[in-house]
Amino acid sequence: MKKENDVKLERVYEKQITVFGKPLRVKRLILISLTGLLLGILGYMEIYAIAWLIVAIFFFCLAVFSLALYIKTILYFGEYCVEASPSGDIYVTKLFGQCTICLGELKIVKNKKGTFIQCQEDKSHIWDIHKKD
Ligand SMILES: [Zn+2]
């Protein structure tokens, strides 16, 4: 049950993630986290220090996060989101939108069929997304 795109999902907050003034890209983050993970594992095999294990676990979590972001392009953390733009730049955003049918909260949902705006109250309230980028 798809309708015309008469709903609005606004970015009420948007901040680009930069490292030393350079935009952080998803692929770079994956590379950094995998390198860090490898380093942590190698370090732990060299000397069985718990610090290396913590490093490995940290970068493992970072790898899982960056891979999920790469696949989904948007991840929700409570009311904030982490989004990856088509060019791979990473943003922390806050989206706000209300369902025009039941006034439920709207979220961006990505599946095999594409990216949609979906109502959180009633999952059958779905709209096509218009790419602004
Ligand atoms: Zn709704």
Image (tube, rainbow, N blue to C red):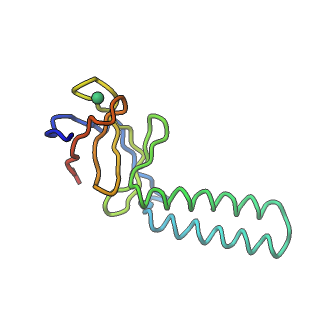
Give 4 or 77, whichever is nearer the viewer: 4
- The spot of residue 48 in percent (x, y) is 86, 68
Q: Nearer the viewer, residue 21 or 56?
A: 56
Residue drawn at x 37%, y 62% as measured from the top left: 88
The quadrant of the picture showing ligand 1 is: top left
Image height of 102 relative to 47, above or below: above
Answer above or below: position of 133 versus 43.
above
Residue 121 position, x and y percent, is 36, 28
Query: Which residue is found at the position 23% from the left and 25% from the top?
Result: 101
Residue 27 sits in which quadrant?
A: bottom left
Horizontal side, residue 10 vs residue 90: left or right: left
Quarter of the picture holding the C terminus: bottom left
Q: Residue at x 19, y 48 (%)?
A: 130
**Image location of residue 85, percent across then percent down:** 33, 57
Is residue 43 positioned above or below 133 on the image? below
Residue 45 image offset from top left, x and y in percent:
80, 74
Q: Residue at x 74, y 75 (%)?
A: 42
Is residue 70 in sight in this rendering?
Answer: yes
Residue furthest to the top in view is 102
State the count of labels.
0
Q: Please identify the quadrant where the N terminus is shown.
A: top left
Up-down relation of residue 15 to residue 38 (above or below): above
Query: Which quadrant of the figure has residue 112?
Result: bottom left
**Can residue 98 be seen in this snapshot?**
no
